[in-house]
Amino acid sequence: MNQLKIIQQKIVQREELPSRLDRSFRATHRIVFTNGCFDILHLGHASYLADARDLGDMLVVGLNTDESVRRLKGANRPVKDQDTRALLLASLQVVDMVVLFPEDTPSELIRLVKPDVLVKGGDYRKEEIAGYETVTAYGGKIVTIPFVKGHSSSSLIQKIEKH
């Protein structure tokens, strides 16, 4: 099969989640979920996503739509549109599934995915992470992963703008 088609198949619609993550799949796979804007992929993202994937058998990434990125980051963001960001994330070996979400938080998406492990960056306190109550209520685990110092989309954008 064409490699681009394989990558594109990793980008799924919300409605596909129940069939892709059915009971028999869940019985044999530990599902990890994380989310973000992933506007400009960089070393920090690669490291974070690899660490997240190490926590289970499948990494599902919730990706903010363009509209939600603008609400969260401002009118000049995202730099890359949601289809480009989704394809770039899906092309990473450690990412098994990418699902877009238009809300400001992935709470609804987390309820659908029902991950065994919910992961966010180390700048969050576990109790403040969207989905914390949902995941802990059924015995799931919340993990924070430290940032790679000096690597963020915002700092990269600022650096580009200076030059």
Image (tube, helix red, strand yellow):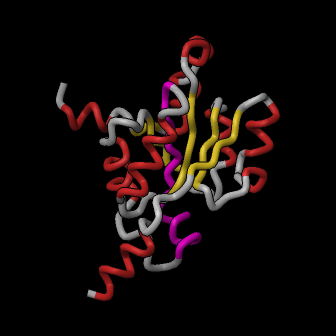
Residue 154 lies in the magenta-colored region:
no
| Point 71% across, 53% down: residue | 129
Q: Which of 89 and 13 lies nearest the eye of the viewer?
A: 89
Q: Which of 24 and 132 lies nearest the eye of the viewer?
A: 132
Residue 17 placed where, x, y %? 55, 30
Q: Is residue 79 above or below residue 134?
A: below
In the image: residue 83, left or right of residue 3 = right
Start-end of magenta stretch: 57-73
Residue 61 lies in the magenta-colored region:
yes
| Point 30% across, 80% down: residue | 160
Q: Which of 121 and 89 lies nearest the eye of the viewer?
A: 121
Residue 104 placed where, x, y %? 63, 60
Residue 29 placed where, x, y %? 54, 19
Residue 140 placed where, x, y %? 72, 31
Extreme-left residue of the structure: 2
Q: Quadrant of residue 32?
A: top right
| Point 42% across, 57% down: residue | 44
In the image: residue 131, left or right of residue 156 = right
| Point 33% across, 36% down: residue | 93
In the image: residue 78, left or right of residue 123 = left
For the image shown, how many numbered marks are present on the structure?
Answer: 0
Q: Is residue 48 above or below residue 116?
A: below
Quarter of the N terminus within the rendering? top left
Quarter of the C terminus within the rendering? bottom left
